[in-house]
């Protein structure tokens, strides 16, 4: 029996989703707003080093996964220069 609609870690899907929501060249504020609307929490307190966005996802088999993205701002701090997508980290029983 397959469970549909349950979270399964998928790095390729995460990369595609983030690239669509926060592409390089996009206004930084817009990229953050779009990621927040997708359930990410973003910390811009160290913007010069990158804006750290993460979200927690629950799996069906008693595990939790953390998806994390770092938005690197351009020299002006107004646009996304690059994305760093960390490996999905999961832990569970």
Image: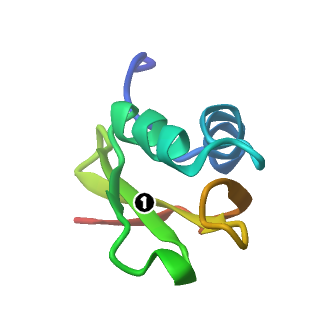
Quick one: SS at disc 1? strand
Describe residue 52's horizontal placement relative to residue 60 as left or right: right
Identify the residue at horizontal 56%, vertical 50% (top origin). Answer: 28
Residue 10 at x, y percent in the picture: 61, 44
Residue 77, quarter of the rendered image: bottom right
Q: Is residue 52 visible?
A: yes
Residue 6 at x, y percent in the picture: 37, 27
Residue 86 at x, y percent in the picture: 59, 68
Within 10 angstroms of label 1, few (less than 14), some, or many (20 or more) residues? many
What residue did someone put label 1 on?
53
Describe residue 56's horizontal placement relative to residue 54 as left or right: left
Residue 37 against residue 65 in the figure, above or below: above
| Front residue of 55 and 5 | 55
Q: How is the image coloured?
A: rainbow
Identify the residue at horizontal 48%, vertical 67% (top origin). Answer: 51
Q: Quadrant of the C terminus?
A: bottom left
Residue 32 at x, y percent in the picture: 46, 46
Identify the residue at horizontal 54%, vertical 42% (top origin). Answer: 31
Residue 43 against residue 29 in the figure, above or below: below
Identify the residue at horizontal 66%, vertical 37% (top origin). Answer: 13
Describe residue 25's horizontal placement relative to residue 20 as left or right: right
| Front residue of 13 and 26 | 26
């Amino acid at each position: 029996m397959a469970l549909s609609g349950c979270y399964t870690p998928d790095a390729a899907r995460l990369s595609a989703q983030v690239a669509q929501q926060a592409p390089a060249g996009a206004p930084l504020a817009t990229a953050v707003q779009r990621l927040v609307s997708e359930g990410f929490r973003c910390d811009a307190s160290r913007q010069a080093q990158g804006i750290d966005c993460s979200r927690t996802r629950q799996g069906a088999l008693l595990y939790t996964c953390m998806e994390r993205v770092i938005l690197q701002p351009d020299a002006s701090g107004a646009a996304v220069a690059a994305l760093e997508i960390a490996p999905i980290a999961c832990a569970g029983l």
